Image (spheres, rainbow, N blue to C red):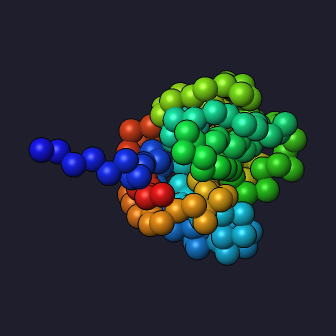
Amino acid sequence: MVSLNRNKFKFYSPVKGKVIKLEKVNDLVFSQKLVGDGIAIQPSGDVVVAPCDGIIKLIFETNHAFVIVTDEGLEIIVHIGIDTVDLKGEGFIRVAEEDQRISVGDEIIKFNKELLENKGCDLTTMILITNYSKIKEMNCFYLNECLAGEDIVIEYEI
């Protein structure tokens, strides 16, 4: 007989790259977990996909970040880069829309990695759970190379 724990869930990498601890992010708002807890990825890819199933509740006007609400009620922010809001959308292309139902691996945002790096942007991308108090346990996987929408970076229990 198979026993399923219906309270365990997974987040997949939203972008190809290297997973690092949130504490190593070069921005105190993220590294001190003021927005939420999670992980960060140093991207080698330029397409950001849904790390989980849910509804896109918000895509920032500048397309550098978006919010997903999972079916379990967790609020997730995927934030592309540090201080990228200052570019006012330059280098970012919105693929999905607000209120859209998405599944793991669906494209949300594309970005021009070369342009943004030439402008001096740190493209470290964060996955943050903003209502972390709903989490009972969380395990992060710090992979040297992860594929967007394919590799698990967080397992959690609610």
In the picture, the quarter occupied by the N terminus is top left
Tell me if residue 40 comes above or below residue 43 in the rendering. below
Tell me if residue 32 comes above or below residue 119 in the rendering. below
Residue 115 lies, in percent from the top left, at 72, 40
Which is more toward the observer, 40 or 77? 77
Does residue 125 appear left or right of residue 14 in this picture? right
Which is more toward the observer, 102 or 28? 102
What residue appears at the point 54 percent right and 45 percent down from the top-left corner? 72
The residue at the far left in this view is 1
| Residue 65 in sight from this viewpoint | yes
How many numbered tags mark residues here? 0
The residue at the far front in this view is 1
Residue 52 lies, in percent from the top left, at 51, 40
Which is more toward the observer, 18 or 31? 31
What residue appears at the point 52 percent right and 62 percent down from the top-left corner? 135
What residue appears at the point 41 percent right and 64 percent down from the top-left corner? 139
What residue appears at the point 65 percent right and 59 percent down from the top-left corner? 131
* Quarter of the rendering containing residue 64: top right
Tell me if residue 110 comes above or below residue 29 in the rendering. above
Does residue 155 appear left or right of residue 106 in this picture? left
* Quarter of the rendering containing residue 141: bottom left
Does residue 16 appear left or right of residue 127 in this picture? left
| Residue 47 in sight from this viewpoint | no
Residue 10 lies, in percent from the top left, at 42, 48
Which is more toward the observer, 67 or 131? 131
* Quarter of the rendering containing residue 149: top left
Tell me if residue 136 comes above or below residue 143 in the rendering. below
